[in-house]
Image (spheres, rainbow, N blue to C red):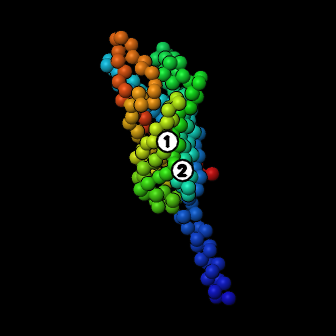
Amino acid sequence: MFKTFSFLSLLASAAFSPLAQAGTYKGNSAGTVTFHNTASLHGIEGKAKSFSTSLDTDALKGSLVVQTKSMTTALGPRDTKMHEFCLESDKFSTITFSVNSIEGGVEGLKTGAGTGSVVLKGSLKIRDTSKNVSIPATYSFTDSGLALSGKHDFKWTDFNVPDPSIFISTLYPDMSVEFNVNLKSE
């Protein structure tokens, strides 16, 4: 009888331990995804209004999918050129970061509690070009789920994006994307 009670107690404590909190988290445009470019005359700031996120803390996989038509710099003619010429938003409707693995701090991530730093490793696809990337990120668990933040610097020319420069202003190829997203437990 004592052995049965001990075994049941062990099962109950395992079921309610922090490790039981690990799992799947999803978000839909909760938080921010922003981008920054520098041109010869000024900087260009933009944001994505529509995106989805997912993270499986058991499998250490996830994604960030941005709807290209939702990206804006708040300047109509520049946005039109970005959508029609650079991103070809009608043809390439999303920019996708597929997380294939996570390194560093994963034990903390798997507990479903606290804060920490990790490296998200995966494939970034812009237009018809994919590149393997590693993105340092931080996470924190909240009452409502998981907050995840990171920043990635790259050159848009590496993704075969056409140069939108005009004769009076050159757009430099250096770009940064920053995300601060909120995901809810599934």
Residue 178 location in percent, x, y?
43, 37
Residue 105 location in percent, x, y?
42, 57
Residue 110 location in percent, x, y?
51, 59
Q: Is residue 52 left or right of residue 153?
A: right
Three-letter amino acid code at disc 2? Lys
Three-letter amino acid code at disc 1? Ser
Helix, strand or loop at mark 1: strand
Q: Which residue is mark 1?
A: 123
Q: Which residue is mark 2?
A: 61
Report the residue at 37% width, 26% height from top: 173
Task: Give the answer, above or below, for where 71 lies relative to 85.
Answer: below
Report the residue at 45% width, 50% height from top: 139
Location of residue 115 (image quadrant): bottom left
Task: Give the answer, above or below, for where 99 lies relative to 86.
Answer: below
Helix, strand or loop at mark 2: strand
Of 69 and 102, nearer the camera is 102
**On the rendered image, what quadrant is the N terminus found in?**
bottom right
Give the mark, 1 or 2, whose residue is nearer the N terminus. Answer: 2
Task: Give the answer, above or below, for where 31 lies relative to 11.
Answer: above
